[in-house]
Image (cartoon, grey):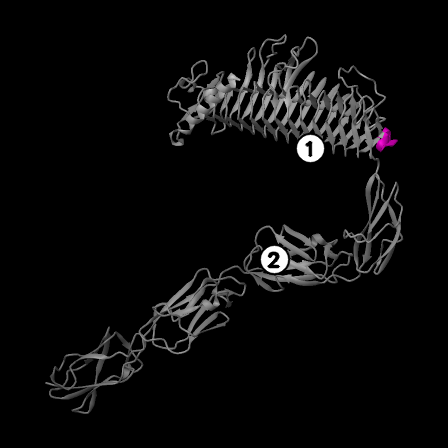
Amino acid sequence: MQKKIKFAMITAFLMLSLATISSASAAQYNLNDSSYSNYFNTSGYINNTSVHAGDVFDISGDINNKDMYIDRPLNITSSARTGQIINGTITILSGGSGTNVTYLNITNTKVDDNSYGIHLIESGNNRIIGNNITTTGNGSGTSGGNGYFTYGVYLEDSNNNVFDSNTIKTTGVSADADWSTWPNPAKYATIGVYLNYDSSNNNFTNNTITTNYNHVVTAWGYDTLAGVRVNTGTDNQFTGNHINTNGNAYIYGVEIVGSSSSTASDNVVSGNVINTNGQVSAQSVKIGTNTLNTIVSQNIIKSVGDSFAYGIYLEGAPSNLHATVTGNKATTIANINYVLELFSASENTITDNVFMGIGNYSLGIGAYKSNNNTIKYNTITTMGDNSAEHIDNDDSIPEGNEGIKLYENSSQNTVQYNIINSNAEYTIDTSDSSNNTITNNYLISDNGKKQGNNAVAPGTGNTITDNYGKKPVAAFTVNTNNGPGPLTVQFIDTSLGDITDWEWDFDNNSVVDCCEAQYSTYTYTKPGTYIAKLKVTGPGGSDSKIIYITVTDATKPTITSVNPANNKIINVANKALVITFSEAIKAGSAFTSIKVTNPDGVSVKPLYKVINGKTLTLTRNGNYINGLTYTITLPTNSITDTAGNTLATAFTSKFTVDFAKPTITRVNPANNKVINVANKAIVITFSENIKAGSAFSNIKVTNPDGVSVKPLYKVINGKTLTLTRNGNYINGLTYTITLPTNSITDTAGNTLATVFTSKFKIDTTRPKITNTNPTNNTINFSLTAPITIKFNKNIIKGTNYSKIYLKNLSTGKLVSITASIQRNTLTIQMTKSRLHYNTYQLHIPAAAVKDQTGNSVASYTLKFKTS
């Protein structure tokens, strides 16, 4: 008790200390064979004051012949998964509580010394995960041995540790164990995983624990080894492990024991696979003396021994165990088998297990001086040879082939609702016990000669009632089971056994169509295959029999729809092709000839074909090629209805793959174009034929304030979309055309890649003359100076540009001129000098020039007189 108090105080102190360590303060040290001495002394203790709690030892390569004693919580790992500790042990002391050991290879082959892989001494809250731990030794223990031990994992008074996903291989000496102090436990020379000295609340999950022997040291033939051993610990959990143990004389896969001064309580062995092999005796699970409330559940157990095999052994003296054994599947194979033995073990619960014993002599459950046990809902099968030669047997329960043997006055036990088959004379032998309750069990013994209550060997004062034997065997005949509908079938019962009730279900719809009758008729009207079922019930249970009734159908299946439809253009590159039929279908003789081919006739491969009710679904591995047309072909015999009728003719259907998105090739007016048509129709041309998408109504033309033009008429014709408005666009404003992504699709349904926008500006104002040189009616104008006409905007030639003329009004003749435009200026130059004191008239007809939008100038006339 003082040790426990001390350890609790140490653990509390460590956890408080660790809580103050920031993860950011953790240092990482690269540890290998050459750097080992930087951190550890020659005895294996940490001698580097720079190593603090929470630091990381990252091991790479081999560390040879060196131990590690961890006295502060560390993270010991191999990030490269190359770290190997060879002939060394990691020992975590109390000060090292909270250490993580992960992803290491530990191989210890020490001889003439203890050989341990991981050793915890008064240490808690450690996590040992993902390691490969291999120990090999020649320790033969203390009972006539050399005083050394070989343990893969060894815990001494260590609590709250986690061992997960480790591979633990232990090979050592199978040596004599001294049981002279029984019921206190003996020491074994070789153990795979050993929890000693009240080690509690430890969790072993998903580990592979393999224990074997390399040598035998024995003086009296009782050499022993164990795969897993718990000595006086409590609340330990062993779940999901693979525990394989091979030995010579006495072998334990999992052993949980207490001592006269300390009880091992509330331990759990659940969901493990436990295989135990021994040359003499194999015992997969032993729950020993001074234990309490152990749970053994959902394990798969196999014990194989040359002479003896025990699946689960409960040893209760001198106190009751209160163990629960439930949901296990245990098989033993030996000359003499005890699939489950109760030795002075009382007040245990044994339920829902499957027990099988295979050998000359096999007891499913054997009880010796064991009382008040509950044995329910188990399935027990024993296969033996009652005439086989007997061998020496030191077990307190004589060998036999009974399913259950209650021996040496085992009393007050309840045996109910079990299924027991045995080739012994009796399935349950209570002849040496009294006051047990044996009811409602299914019992068959003596090769079927004894059943129910007759298969129980009664003792004194036992209650043996309502046990039963073989259930009835359902059988019936029909006058026909095949034909065209309506088909009337006569059913005649031919069942065997003690029957009290008949239930007929002619169409397997779980509705009883007729009962309490051995003969009946039923008429089937619709084609199909029906299941007619008869269930018979008697004292021994129930049994059912079915017969298939086929009502034939000559109507051929037809194809009602294809998705995609024939000649459909699709935009899904890996589309599943779904063909729907007029009725439920199945694969025909040419099912493998169903194909999808490209234009060159090459079949798509692989092509997966799945039938579900009325539908056939064809899927491919990969994508169809864009732009190609594919053909689906179903040969006549490829599909049939459930009656076997084929298609009337071969079926073909085509589809074209198009997953290229449509693009805009032209916009009129072009982007940022200035136009002078106030009610211009906007025409957008695409790369392919189009149709309205889901956002078609969101197409819009908006003014600079974002206000949409309404109403806006949208018309699709082939590749073009035309937008027209009711009324005129406002002069001087810039408008924006917007096409959302989903507003337009091609005929295959492919949308635009992105939102499309384009702008145009309205300008319907004619250019105006702002300045002339000379001005109108000027006198004394130069004889040679050019005539310039300036406008309020840049101009270009109009349709009447060539009709500009200059006339000498004094002579009445036209003069020769040249005209040129520079930005907003029209320049007129005479080819010869003008005459003195003559009057000239320049005429610019309407549409002679225009602005860049196309607005034409009005007609203009200018007069001037020369000097």
Q: Marks 2 and 1, Cα distance to the nearest angstrom?
A: 58 Å
- Residue 62: image x %, image y %? 48, 21
Circle 2 packing at 10 Å, graded few (<14), some (14-19), many (20+), is: some
Circle 1 residue: 327
Q: Is residue 802 above or below residue 345?
A: below
Circle 1 packing at 10 Å, graded few (<14), some (14-19), many (20+), is: many
| Residue 251 seen in render | yes
Circle 2 residue: 598
Q: Is residue 286 left or right of residue 756?
A: right
Q: Is residue 372 left or right of residue 780?
A: right
- Residue 602: image x %, image y %? 63, 55
Q: Kindly indicate the quadrant of the structure image that contains residue 810.
A: bottom left
Q: Secondary structure at mark 1?
A: loop
The magenta-colored residue range is 445-454
Q: How many marks?
A: 2
- Magenta stretch: residue 97 in it? no
